[in-house]
Amino acid sequence: MAKTPEKIFKSLDFTSLPEKSLISLIKRDDLQMKEIEVWEHVLKWGLKQNKNLISDDPNAWTDDDLRIMENTLRNCLPLIRFYSLSSKEFLHEVRPYKKLFKQQFY
């Protein structure tokens, strides 16, 4: 599983994984996947858990949408190794979701 995580992350039913299974997977130190890809998959998982969101675009989210996504991802975000992202990856892929993070994270 750790050597070929793309089989799980790219499967059609990845977004139906229970949170506990997702956490177990992303916290592995031997996961053979770039951390930016982990972030993208966790975000995709979170969005699919909340089908009532009006948009995937965080700039279009209401305060309620933001609270829902914060709650959905609160156990996953601390496990993503954002420090290993390049500044370009962080700027383009993470910064648009800045409101999801507690002040001390960001």
Image (cartoon, rainbow, N blue to C red):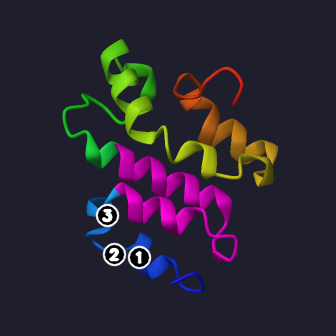
How far apart, in angstroms, are the residues tagged by discs 3 and 2? 10 Å
Q: Are circles 2 and 1 on residues that touch, CB within 8 Å?
A: yes
In the depicted view, which residue is nearer to us: 35 or 59? Answer: 35
89 or 2, nearer to the observer: 2
How many angstroms separate mark 1 from mark 3 (CA)? 9 Å
Q: Position of residue 61 (x, y in %)?
A: 36, 21
Residue at 27% x, 46% y is: 49
Q: Residues within 10 Å of mark 3 (few under 14, many from 20)?
A: some
- Circle 2 packing at 10 Å, graded few (<14), some (14-19), many (20+), is few
1 or 3: tag closer to the N-terminus: 1
Residue drawn at point x = 71 percent, y = 52 percent: 81
| Residue position for label 2 | 11
Residue 10 inside the magenta-drawn segment? no
Give the x, y percent position of residue 3: 60, 86
Q: Are marks 1 and 3 in contact (CB under 8 Å)?
A: yes
What residue is disc 1 on? Answer: 8
- Label 2 sits on what residue type? Ser
Q: Secondary structure at mark 1?
A: helix
The magenta region covers 19-46
- Image position of 37 with respect to 76: above or below: below
Instruction: Tell me: residue 7, above or below residue 39.
Output: below
- Residue 8 lies left or right of residue 26; in this view the side is left
Q: Residues within 10 Å of mark 1 (few under 14, many from 20)?
A: some
Task: Give the labeled residue for mark 3.
Answer: 17
Q: CA distance from mark 2 to mark 1?
A: 5 Å
Against 38, residue 57 (above or below) is: above
Classified by dominant secondary structure, the portion drawn in magenta counts as: helix
**Is 42 inside the magenta-drawn segment?**
yes
35 or 17, which lies in front? 17
